[in-house]
Amino acid sequence: MDNRRLFLWLSLAALVYLIWNAWELEFASPPPLTITPHAVTSRPARRLNPKYLNSKGETQTVPQIRHSGFSPSVEVRTDLYHARIDLVGGRLASVALLRYPKKLRAGSPPVHWLEDRGPRHLYAVATLVAKRTATAPGLTGRFRAPQKTYTLKPGTPSLVIPLVWTHQGVTVTERWIFHAGSYRIGVETRVVNDSRKPWRGAPLLGLAYRHPQVQSSFFDRFLPENFIYHGAAYFNGRSYHELSPAEIQKKKFDLAAREGWLAYTNHYFLAALLPPPSGSWRYYAVSRTKTGYWLGALGPLARVRPGKGTSWALALYVGPKQQRVLATVAPGLAQTVDYGFLSILSRPLYQLLAWIEHLVGNWGVAIILLVLLIKIIFFPLQHTSGRSMARIRAIQPRIKAIQDRFKDDREQSYRATLELYKKEKVNPVSGCLPMLLQFPIYIALYWVLLASVELRHAPFALWIRDLSAPDPLYILPVLYAGTMLVQQWVNPQAAGMDKHQRRILMVMLPVMSLLFGSVMPSGLVLYWVVSGLFGIGQQWHINRVVLREAAKAHR
């Protein structure tokens, strides 16, 4: 089989896959929501619905929230964050990620991941809720803070922001803990009941976000970043699931599980609710407006007698989807990195690429070394197929003679060509096998370069300053098209292909390579270029060896 025809078929398959993904994103209905039975507790749902929740699963205070105007707040500055905690409801209202600029240029502002006043309208809540007969801050209670600004000093391991709420003898203290060099935020909540009645309530972690329906053309769906999942997700203690807006609107998501979490994720960043692993928490999601959604994690109901107190240790993760970090924060959290249907290959490929980058300190060099490693692994198979292709090239004049002799009888020409292959012990299909085996690696690496935040704004050399973005000067796509053109020259011509067909391929393959390379991440095109150069050198060497062997055999 000719490698160029195989490349065309694989390109067509890739195009069909992109079209299918685009159709799924725009028109297809969401898959049914499934909950793993062994991750759900056997307690009836009615027991998980205390009186402080309404029929929609929201806390009674949710409809009372008003975001107009400015509420008293506390400013927090650390080595990673510039954050704002709103004293009304004790919510993390704004977070700027200082180490992640929006654009790759000097003076670019940092990414504002949480922002309760922006179009995303994403913020996190950690509070206590109680029955109507009890008292708790909920989402509208006003906390007090000793000061308005907190700054993490260099050399200090953590920064604690204490917030206090009191009402009718009940005191709730929240200690927001920001750690140096960490995107995990701890929230220690304690309630002390100095009233005369028992207090009953539960901790609540929440995420409010807006998921607007963006109007875009059909062709916008083919942009690489649009294939990454944006939206809610959850972990039920055993498996990871995505939770689209359509699922939240059409189905009531209500789950009780241990060691779970809820999150909102986009291309590179994550906001996750991390309840403590002990105890069964209730996870739910509701649609509050046409584009607004609420994710809630409600803890078990606690009873505090007069003069007593109790506490909870909660946590949030607000930051980039760094896989090596996420794996240590919570089980399954690293699965929020969207690697598509080939994640079984992408994840080990990322681990290998990250290990190489750790040694050399440059992601572009790591990609080149990864090419070399893959070439070494596939060398025996590639060498065998290369010799077969070189033999086809050596007998090309005899194939052309058969085509001229049976130009009016294609079936007889085909049979005679097969007899020649059999006589010369040539297998035309063997040249396709290495490409078929490497094609999934191409796709898996594409997802790694597209979805890994570690490669965002990662420089290589010279003009390549962002390996996750297309080449701004189109030099790598041109080199990729050039390698495809040279590969056609060193590889044998397909049997049965006339001059007109060969000329079409000589033009079509480089053009398609140029088009693909101009929209793909430059890191992936770098991989293709280096892989093509290695392949050209290897095939050229094999052609010379086979020609020398053929010359010796005819002496």
Image: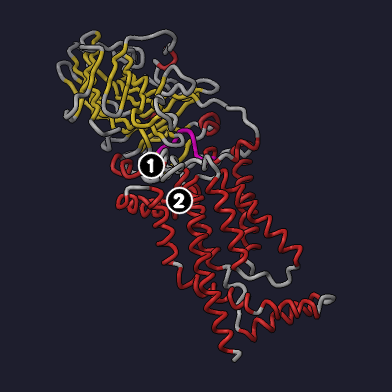
In the rendered structure, which amino acid carries the disc numbered 1?
Glu
Q: Position of residue 536 (x, y in %)?
A: 53, 65
Disc count in the image?
Answer: 2
In the image: residue 258, left or right of residue 241: left
Going from N to C along the chain, the mark reached first, 2 or 1, is 2
Assess disc 2: are there few (<14), some (14-19) or many (≥20) residues with their C-alpha within 10 Å of its C-alpha: some
Q: Are marks 2 and 1 in contact (CB under 8 Å)?
A: no
Give x and y (percent) for residue 270.
Answer: 39, 34
Q: Quarter-wise, where is residue 201 in the image?
A: top left
Q: Which residue is drawn at 49% across and 46% down?
A: 522
Magenta span of residues = 227-234
Query: Residue 343: which numbered mark, if any?
Result: 2
Q: Which amino acid type corresponds to the residue marked 2 in the rendered image?
A: Ser
> Residue lying furthest left in this view?
307
User: Extreme bottom residue here?
Assistant: 555
Q: In this view, does 472 lie to the left or right of 89?
A: right
Q: Name the residue nearer the viewer: 515 or 28.
A: 515
Dot label at residue 144: none
> Is 116 colored magenta in this rendering?
no
Quadrant of the rendered structure where residue 114 is? top left
Q: Which of 457 and 279 is in front in this view?
A: 457
Residue at which label 1 appears: 454
What's the coloring here?
secondary structure
